[in-house]
Image (spheres, grey):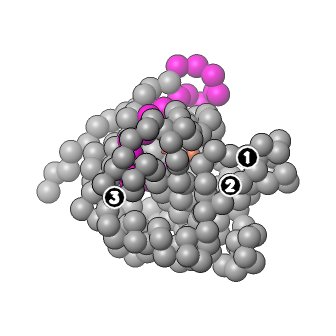
Amino acid sequence: MLLPSIAITSHAVLFPARAQHQDTDILAWIHAVEAVAPFRTMTTPRGLPMKAAITNAGTVGWVSDRHGYRYSTVDPMTGKPWPVLNDDVVNLVCQSAGDAGFPGFRPDVCLINRYDVGAGMGAHRDEDEQDFSAPIVSISLGLPARFFFGGLERTGPTVAVPLAHGDVLVWGGPDRLRYHGVRPLKPGSHPLTGSRRFNLTFRKALSM
Ligand code: SIN
Ligand code: FE2
């Protein structure tokens, strides 16, 4: 089956609504994850609260506090390991990565962001992983986002990438370290998530 795809840049591909048929399963998985590793507001190294609430699943989890950004084998809030990844979602992620030109991608972590109305994420690069040869695979659920994709420098032109419920976005290769972010979430209501948006980014954090 040929899936619709939109090239955003040379190595960033959007698959509109590709995760939509699994939306209730993915949401159920998010709720199972948050039952063990609750969403929380993390603090940036400068001491400011992040606007999106965050949790993780996988071998390690991305955390931020006054000591900096890093991956941690345990959830600092509970001292427990992060919940495991979900095989069905990982299959979708691996197929999407393959179709975007990254065969063989196996994620070891999923960072889950939860945005309430008004929450966004400033321009940043995903650069705490050990293996930049692996892409990032993003799945969006719920209210639409105004995602933007920039260049290899923090400032400069950006491309607006509207991300709707079920959209899968893959970026890697020469585009792996591009700056990106999310404009503040506009008010609205989604039948499955209410006045929220969830975003899952699957990454390969460890090089082994
Ligand atoms: C991120 O860059 O970590 C989040 C992207 C998104 O919410 O779409
Ligand atoms: Fe990111």
**In the rendered view, would you say 107 is above or below 168?**
below
Mark 3 and mark 1: Cα distance apart in space:
27 Å
Among the 4 quarters of the image, the one containing residue 145:
top left
Query: Which residue is label 1 attached to?
Result: 49
Query: Which residue is label 3 attached to?
Result: 192
Answer yes or no: disc 3 within 8 Å of ligand 1.
no
Mark 2 and mark 1: Cα distance apart in space:
6 Å
Q: Is residue 175 visible?
A: no
Q: Nearer the viewer, residue 142 or 106?
A: 142
Q: Quick check: 95 left or right of 4?
A: right
Which residue appears farthest toward the left when viewing the image? 1
Magenta residues?
A: 134-157
In the image, what residue type sits under mark 1?
Pro
In the image, what residue type sits under mark 2?
Thr
- Where residue 78 is drawn, which disc sits there? none
Query: Which residue is label 2 attached to?
Result: 41
The residue tagged with tag 3: helix, strand or loop? loop
Return the x and y of residue 126 as percentages of the image width and height. Answer: 61, 46
